[in-house]
Amino acid sequence: MHAISHYQELITDYFSELHLTKDPKNLYEPIEYILSLGGKRMRPILTLMAAEVFDIDCKNALAAATAIEVFHNFSLVHDDIMDDAPLRRGNETVHEKWNINTGILSGDAMLILAYQHFEEYEPKIFRELAKLFSKTALEVCEGQQYDVDFETRDDVTIPEYLKMIEYKTAVLVAAAMKMGAIVAETTSENAELIYDFGLNLGLAFQLQDDYLDAFGDPETFGKQVGGDIIENKKTYLYLKAIAFSDENQKNQLMHLFSIHPSDNADKIISVKEIFNTTGASSATQQAIQDFTFKAFETLEKMNISSDKKNMLRTFGENLMNRNV
């Protein structure tokens, strides 16, 4: 296995050779634009890494890794339209730079382009990749719909929330890793185990994102701290606080999550205080740890060398040790 920077370089080079700009330009230029914005490209890195875990050259998995990244960016284009978001990775979103209709159509084209990358594989591998991809793509759509539905509900349960973030976020991480296993033609048991590894790590990562949104260091988090509180998002922290609070705390929290003050500073401070005093913040940290350990438990069952298990464990630890 190589350093993360090696995988990133391979992916960047591969993307630079795709030559997406063709007629009609108003369809393909937005696609090239969103893909050029880069980002961490964690998912395709996981596909390449998983392929090498199971003893093949990671370059064999570049087409599958590209499919995952194109799909992920397709979902971002459509999510940005739904959220009316002006910026993505510090740049104008596609629908702002062009228009909503272009964003919808270019996003649709990206979904089809993602499937086309599987055509580089032999029929048996193509079939397995396409089957997993279809299942995952549908789950991501279901997760997005759950997220939209939760905005207008006051009775969201913790199991429902966990299912939402599993579908919206974690399944794509899991699928990215399993695709590397499929390309490597490892055993079905190994493929399922690395899927479970990715799924639990994805859940831990999203819960940590929830936590850092409230308690992260603004210098290192990369987003506006308190953004979920400002938007009244019912995250794991919020749901745990509701579950643990007394009547006064519950009423105060529900009130705070029903208002949009012009200055959010006091609101953020008050909400974070409730998160801490109810024990919601420590419960969220415990859940992050539980899902991370669950991911590591699957490594022990995987039929790979100890060195590779340690590398995957180190990757997981580094992923979860973001600055707070």
Image (cartoon, rainbow, N blue to C red):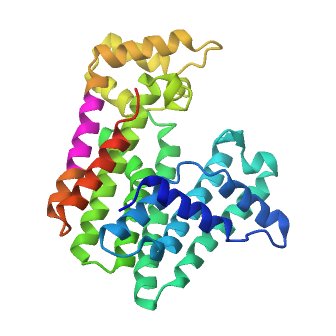
132 or 1, which lies in front? 1
Residue found at x 50% / y 24%: 229
Find residue 107 and report its horizontal and vertical position in percent.
Answer: 67, 61
160 or 162, which lies in front? 162
67 or 1, which lies in front? 1
Q: Is residue 226 visible?
A: no
Instruction: State yes or no: residue 29 in magenta.
Output: no
Viewed as shown, does residue 291 lie left or right of 47? Answer: left
Position above or below: 154 against 190:
above
Count of number-bearing discs? 0
Find residue 247 and report its horizontal and vertical position in percent.
Answer: 30, 14
Q: Which residues are magenta?
A: 283-294
Question: Most extreme residue toward the left, as rendered?
Answer: 301
Instruction: State yes or no: residue 292 in magenta.
Output: yes
Position above or below: 196 against 124:
above
**Magenta stretch, overall SS:** helix
Position above or below: 19 against 127:
above
Position above or below: 12 against 95:
below
Residue found at x 22% / y 59%: 307
Residue found at x 28% / y 31%: 285
- Say which quarter of the image contains residue 242: top left
Can you say which quadrant of the picture contains the N terminus? bottom left
Find residue 98 and report its horizontal and vertical position in percent.
Answer: 82, 52
Q: Is residue 82 visible?
A: yes
Find residue 306 and report its horizontal and vertical position in percent.
Answer: 17, 60
Can you say which quadrant of the picture contains the C terminus? top left
- Say which quarter of the image contains residue 299: bottom left
Residue found at x 49% / y 28%: 220
87 or 271, which lies in front? 87
